[in-house]
Image (cartoon, rainbow, N blue to C red):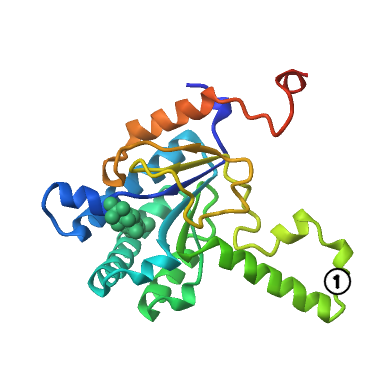
Amino acid sequence: MDNLKVPRHIAIIMDGNGRWAKKFGLNRIYGHKNGVKSVREAVEFCGEKGVEFLTLYAFSTENWNRPSEEVNALMELLVDSIIKETPDLNKNNVRLNAIGNLHTFPENVCTKLNQAIVSTSNNTGLTLTLALAYGSRLEIVEAVKQIARKAAEKEIEPESINEKFFESYLATSGIPDPELIIRTSGEQRLSNFLLWQAAYSEFYFPTVLWPDFRKKNFEEALKEYQKRERRFGKTSEQLKQ
Ligand code: FPP
């Protein structure tokens, strides 16, 4: 594999946990539990390959509409995983980060998450961002609101607003755009994930369900990415210059 073409940032929509559980006649939550194993492998894999940023869509704003037993079980799983995994995150030099409407989460989830974020904040390896109660349109609207307030208070000139300035108001400020976005389970949609940031991303849609997406599948994703030529609107000839 060509190590030079490893993306700096990979974002993943972890899909198919429910279907995985159904295949075995199990409750959906078993799918999520097995999904945590894939999360662990994804983090390890990115660390090994020298990926700098991994962003995981763990809970969307729309996921609040699921049956309350599933939402509660997911919250519990999240807290348990955070507590259990933090020592390993530290051992592997991983910095934990979160984006989304965290204030809509139960207090114990926020507290544990913030403790893990603080505990890993000095790590210098992979930055693992969990998108929790995250929705990209809302993220963009919130950025617009903040900028509009500044303009109304005459702190900024509307003419001075450019893409770079706008980006600095997004939740992902300071994180480069993902070069590769993976969605498992065969679905081929962004589902309100990183809409602005995905402007030039390569997409990869394996049919494998998230609990089955392990290192060998990630390796395949990376190989596929490396085959693609990223042109940013330029011609192949311009890129060779
Ligand atoms: C989508 O599958 C998955 C989720 C909504 C939750 C993802 C959460 C985890 C993998 C566990 C916790 C995460 C961390 C970071 C510790 P789905 O339920 O929509 O599956 P389906 O489409 O087959 O129904």
Picture quarter containing residue 161? bottom right
Q: Nearer the viewer, residue 20 or 223?
A: 20
Q: Secondary structure at mark 1?
A: loop
Of all residues, the one furthest to the left in this rendering is 25
Position of residue 132 measured from the top left corner of the image (x, y, whole percent) = 44, 64
Position of residue 225 measured from the top left corner of the image (x, y, whole percent) = 51, 29
Position of residue 36 measured from the top left corner of the image (x, y, whole percent) = 29, 53
Determine the residue positioned at 63% across, 41% down: 200
The type of residue carrying mark 1 is Ile
Position of residue 33 measured from the top left corner of the image (x, y, whole percent) = 24, 56
Q: Give the answer, above or below, for where 166 lies relative to 88.
A: below
Quarter of the C terminus within the rendering: top right
Label 1 beta carbon within 8 A of ligand 1: no
Determine the residue positioned at 23% across, 50% down: 19
Q: Is residue 241 left or right of residue 106?
A: right
Q: How many marks?
A: 1
Determine the residue positioned at 47% across, 55% down: 191
Determine the residue positioned at 87% across, 78% down: 154
- Rate crowding at label 1 as few (under 14), some (14 to 19) or many (20 or more) other CA atoms within 10 Å: some
Q: Quadrant of ligand 1?
A: bottom left
Q: Is residue 215 left or right of residue 150?
A: left
Q: Nearer the viewer, residue 222 or 51?
A: 222
Q: Which residue is mark 1?
A: 156
Query: Is residue 36 shown to the viewer in this render?
Result: no
Q: Give the answer, above or below, for where 101 lies relative to 33.
A: below
Q: Is residue 238 left or right of residue 90?
A: right
Query: Is residue 41 shown to the viewer in this render?
Result: yes
